[in-house]
Image (tube, helix red, strand yellow):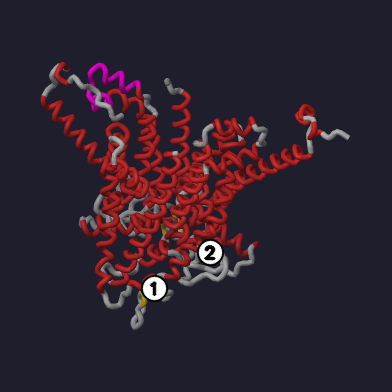
Amino acid sequence: MVTNENSPDQARFTKTRFGRRTELTERIAKTVFFLMSVAMIVPLVAIISYLVIRAWPSLSLEFVLDVPRKGMTQGGIWPAFVGTVYLVFISLAVSAPIGVMAAVYLNEYAKDNWLNRTINLAVINLAGVPSIVHALFGLGAFVYAARFGYSILSASLTLAIMTLPVIIASTREALASVPMSFREACWNVGATRWQTIRSIVLPNSISGILTGVILQVSRAAGETAPIMFTGAVFFKSIERGDLFAYNLNEQCMALSMHLYTVTTQVPKVEESIPYATAVVLLGSVLVVNATAIAFRVWLRARKKW
Amino acid sequence: MSSSPTRKQRQRPRRALWAVAGETLLEWIIRLSGISAIIFVLAIFVFVFREAAPVLTNEEFNLVEFFTSIAWYPTSAQNVRYGTLALIAGTFSVTALAMALAVPFGLGGAIYISEFCRPRTREVLKIVIELLAAVPSVVWGFIGLTVMSRLLVEYGGAPVGVNMLNGAIILALMAVPIIVSIGEDALKAVPDSFREAGIAMGASRWQLIYRVLLPAAKNGLLAAVLLGIGRAVGETMAVLMATGHAVQIPHGILDPIRTLTANVAAELGEAPAGSPHYRVLFMTGVLLFTITFVVNLTADFVIRGVKRK
């Protein structure tokens, strides 16, 4: 009997046992990897749905606009919400210019030498420093050494340094996506390096930079540890719906900190309040993030080069 | 970007002095921002260490005991002890368990996204992973404290819901997005010629992954795992809320533990500024900084090893 292995021409067209086994392995591998991917997504969806269901009794616009009542066991989250807005925008005002300029330096000016390799390492490490170490740094540097005290200013500066790598990384990506030929064309008509950056590189990458800034907002809004010891406070009494309630040099409430407080520190909180706080925080962060992603997708679709 | 834009500076029409001066100034500000990352990393170390340093000369504090003793009694009246071994054990055990859960799923997800799925699905999955990475750590902690702990008590038979397993599951969910996105980058960096050669040899996709892609991308995948570890070691709020606050060496995965990060977060508020307790907490910060610094540096060297190839 002539087996398939002996005639290569036939073997190519006939499935050997080895071929069937390979196909089976192939199908198993694909299924397993697919299930693994699904296993990451299912918990997210399940958990969010669960949180929303539990939060439902409290969830309303009124919940966001109202102040906490009866020792934070009832009412809303306005002081925390507005505090987070303050912290985010002040930290943004500090970290966006520094981060964008640092990225401009790294992408447009830096040569490949030891200094710039060190800068790259520093950026990577800054992104990896634990948030609680940032908190210790903020406490040591801003609260005590710089004498800003426990204040919005200290907390925002701590957040700014913490979120700097986010802006640097995404701005660099945006700058790097501007083709080299654009710069060369500009240099050839006699523009200096900075003129080229200002008139060609930045306008062509501004949307990518904005995406990075939006991501910084979402990151800063969710952080808890760095602000816990530098400026966020358990409770602060402000008017319902008051937008200009805080000063730079005083402490504020923050949404992330408030979630921690009502979950672990305050007894007998109305049951749905922690869930509703979590949903508002998670919702804001995800909406901001989704905006950045949608922006990026839209940008990629209309890219001219 | 290293070549100079113009060499013939003299032929250019003269610009106003203030414009030239302004541009020079601006370029120096940009350079300064460039090196700011170095300044900030150094500043973090210096300021944290500056607050911690005085305790080194305190007779109640002993550096050997700090690393080797499991006795952590920072507020005891007679017998103050600052041993962080139980906290270090807590950090490493919960990180190890989290990685045991996250690495297979993370790498599996990375392989699926990079090799198996269609471009459309890939875009969707990457967006979901990005959103998963954006969930704030305090929300993860809240999920651990409410949802996960209830599940563990009801279905896992745990006496207490907040424990090492709970923290590890939460940390795994937090580390998976990093592992997936960096692992996917690593797989994408393998040249297509490798894949084509494999397919030309008649390899199936699984054989291709197992025999060609994984060996070729192993450094990048290792870096992905290392960065996941870095994230898990440094995570604070989630483990603070989910691991259950017992300073002890864990004997099983359902034991409550406390990590280095959670310990600082839990006690810093009660330690009076300048007290030995406060300074020891800063010392823990120095330790944490060093651990993550080493992990991140290693990850970077591993990645750059790939690029050089």
Q: Which mark is residue B164?
A: 2
Picture quarter with the N terminus of chain A: top right
Residue at left offset 46%, top offset 27%:
A300
Instruction: Give the camera-side residue of B209 and A281.
Output: B209
Q: Residue B124 is drawn in which quadrant? A: top right
* Image location (x, y in percent) of residue B189: 49, 36
Residue sitting at the far bottom:
B78
Picture quarter with the C terminus of chain A: top left
Dot 1: few (<14), some (14–19), or many (≥20) neighbours within 10 Å? many
Nearest to N terminus: mark 2 or mark 1: 1
* Image location (x, y in percent) of residue B125: 56, 38
Above or below, B26 against B42 in this view is above
Instruction: Give the camera-side residue of B81 and B128.
Output: B81
Chain letter of disc 2? B
Disc 1 marks which residue? B83
Q: Is residue B251 visible?
A: yes
Q: Amino acid at mark 2?
A: Met
Residue sitting at the far left:
B17
Q: Secondary structure at mark 2?
A: helix
* Image location (x, y in percent) of residue B258: 46, 66
Instruction: Please report the bounds of the magenta region as a residue range.
Output: A181-198
A126 to the left or right of A287: left
Residue at left offset 36%, top offset 35%:
A172
Q: Nearer the viewer, mark 2 or mark 1?
A: 1
Q: Which mark is residue A167?
A: none
Q: Secondary structure at mark 1?
A: loop
Q: Residue B54 is drawn in which quadrant? A: bottom left
